Image (cartoon, helix red, strand yellow):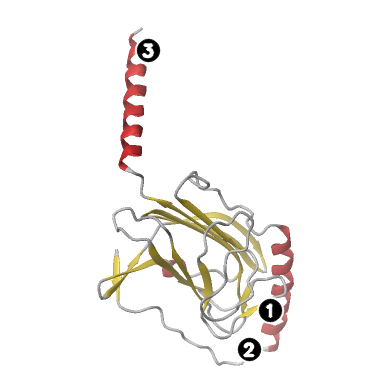
């Protein structure tokens, strides 16, 4: 667990890009549109708890607000959560295909969410095109008392497709059952300029109720007992 007292700071870039940079950016936008049209959640996984009681799912495919809070509501079919995904670096644009693209700046992202239960797990997946995210910048942030706390998670790379830049699908999974929270943010940023943020999904689940854990334990004990009986026979 990492403790901090402030959010990541914006670092605007004012240098004028070269002409070749512009041409590459136009090509990147065309590729982003084509990739987005194929499958916004291609290579993402469905967590085993999605759709169960006391869980929420949110998916973002088309972004309309390029800069500022509150951000973009989920718009993928089946979304039940109402968190917002925002981009905070002032040079980003929303492309015709609905991606968040930033030619001259390093995009800064924030997901703000609140659920009607005590959080047990948070699973976040992203799909980016062009430049990559700064994977070391991804944290779950929550507030307690007078301080903000930043919780890291191990990243799993689900897919990587080379091209002009690269298309990458990533997953982060937080176990926050011990934190006793239901309101949190996810903060992260681009590693370089020219990142096209294509889509994201967010799944949350409540802390399992004690009764559920007892039933699970009993089930495992019965299974073990039957296995021993079978082996003896």
The C terminus - image quarter: top left
The number of numbered discs placed on residues in the rendered structure image is: 3
- Distance CA(mark 2)–CA(mark 3): 72 Å
> Where residue 188 sits: x, y (%)?
46, 71
Q: Which mark is residue 25?
A: 1
Binning the other alpha carbons within 10 Å of mark 2 as few (below 14), some (14 to 19) or many (20 upward) gives few
Report which quarter residue 148 is drawn in: bottom left
Q: Nearer the viewer, residue 211 or 86?
A: 211
Q: Which mark is residue 17?
A: 2
Q: Dot 2 lies on which element?
A: loop
The N terminus - image quarter: bottom left
User: Sequence-wise, which precedes: disc 3 or disc 1?
Assistant: 1
Q: Dot 1 lies on which element?
A: helix
Q: Residue at x 43, y 60 (%)?
A: 115
As drawn, 207 above or below 74: above
Residue bearing the label numbered 3 = 230
Q: Which of 85 and 15 is in front in this view?
A: 85
User: Sequence-wise, which precedes: disc 1 or disc 2?
Assistant: 2
């Amino acid at each position: 667990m990492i403790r901090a007292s402030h959010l990541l700071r914006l670092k605007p870039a004012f240098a004028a890009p070269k002409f070749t940079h512009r041409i590459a950016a136009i090509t990147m936008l065309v590729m982003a549109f084509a990739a987005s049209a194929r499958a916004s959640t291609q290579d993402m996984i469905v967590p085993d708890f999605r759709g169960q009681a006391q869980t929420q799912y949110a998916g973002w495919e088309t972004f309309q607000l390029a800069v500022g809070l509150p951000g973009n509501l989920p718009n993928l079919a089946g979304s039940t959560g109402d968190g917002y995904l925002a981009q905070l670096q002032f040079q980003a644009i929303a492309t015709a295909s609905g991606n968040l693209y930033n030619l001259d700046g390093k995009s800064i992202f924030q997901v703000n969410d609140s659920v009607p239960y005590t959080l047990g797990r948070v699973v976040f997946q992203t799909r980016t095109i062009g430049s990559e995210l700064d994977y070391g910048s991804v944290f779950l942030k929550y507030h307690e008392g007078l301080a903000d706390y930043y919780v890291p998670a191990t990243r799993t790379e689900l897919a990587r497709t080379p091209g002009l830049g690269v298309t990458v699908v990533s997953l982060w999974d937080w176990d926050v059952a011990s934190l006793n929270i239901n309101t949190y943010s996810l903060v992260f940023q681009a590693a370089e300029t020219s990142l096209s943020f294509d889509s994201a999904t967010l799944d949350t689940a409540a802390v399992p109720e004690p009764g559920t854990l007892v039933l699970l334990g009993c089930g495992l004990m019965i299974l073990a007992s039957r296995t021993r009986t079978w082996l003896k026979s």
